[in-house]
């Protein structure tokens, strides 16, 4: 069974985007000498990416308009917008929880929950995320789009790993 992984960055006060939806604050404290490529290490065990429409739209219009940066993966974009799928990017209005449950039964590597907040919160609510990779960025935004909203139940986690570089801290948790 495929493992479902959340791999995301958040501000110290728990936001994944500022009030305008921007992520241009996603940087360390300026000392790139000690940067660690946590993404490449994580991506070795992934073959599927799931994201919401806003995340997809931000990638293709703002963050990487000239190149699809997740070409090595099969991507599912959960949306109510009608868009024609390609051989690598599938647009679906399927319930995210049902989509994840179906995909985790397939053979292959793991599933990366890429964003956004609404999608993540639905999956957290149904407790279908196996591993939480969260990078804390040394920034306090004060407001914006929260990673975690109010939950109706507790999810107990076990800390597997921490690492710090360039003022950022990676936290890796699994369910216990």
Image (cartoon, helix red, strand yellow):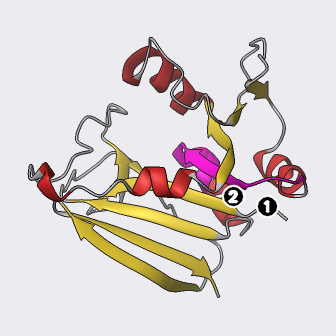
- Front in this rendered view, residue 73 or 173: 73
Which residue is at a point 65% across and 78% down the rendered structure image?
Answer: 153
Q: Residue 85 placed where, x, y %?
A: 78, 17
Report helix, strand or loop for mark 1. Answer: loop
User: In the rendered structure, does residue 119 fall within the stretch colored magenta?
Assistant: yes
Q: Residue 40 placed where, x, y %?
A: 46, 50
Q: Are marks 1 and 2 in contact (CB under 8 Å)?
A: no
Q: Quadrant of residue 114?
A: top right
- Front in this rendered view, residue 70 or 17: 70
Q: How many marks?
A: 2
**In the image, is 86 to the left or to the right of 73?**
right
Which residues lie in the magenta part? 106-120
**In the image, is 135 to the left or to the right of 71?**
left
Q: Of callouts 1 and 2, which one flags the residue occurring earlier in the amino acid sequence?
A: 1
Which residue is at a point 79% across and 52% down the rendered structure image?
Answer: 100
Read off the residue under disc 1. Answer: 2
Which residue is at a point 47% across and 25% down the rendered structure image?
Answer: 59
Query: What quarter of the picture does the N terminus occupy?
Result: bottom right
Residue 123: give its label. 2
Q: Quadrant of residue 136?
A: bottom left
């Amino acid at each position: 069974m495929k493992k479902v992984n959340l791999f995301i960055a958040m501000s110290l006060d728990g936001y994944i985007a500022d009030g305008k939806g921007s992520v241009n604050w996603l940087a360390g404290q300026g000392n790139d000498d000690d940067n660690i490529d946590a993404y490449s290490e994580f991506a070795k065990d992934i073959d599927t990416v799931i994201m919401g429409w806003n995340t997809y739209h931000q990638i293709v219009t703002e963050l990487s308009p000239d190149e699809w940066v997740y070409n090595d993966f099969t991507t599912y974009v959960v949306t109510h917008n009608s868009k024609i799928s390609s051989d690598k990017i599938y647009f679906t209005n399927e319930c995210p929880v049902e989509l994840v449950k179906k995909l985790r039964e397939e053979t292959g590597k793991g599933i990366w929950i890429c964003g956004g907040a609404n999608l993540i919160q639905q999956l957290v609510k149904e407790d279908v995320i196996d591993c939480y990779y969260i990078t804390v960025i040394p920034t306090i935004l004060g407001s914006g789009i929260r990673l975690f909203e109010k939950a109706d139940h507790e999810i107990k986690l076990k800390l597997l790993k921490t690492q710090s570089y360039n003022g950022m801290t990676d936290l890796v948790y699994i369910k216990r």
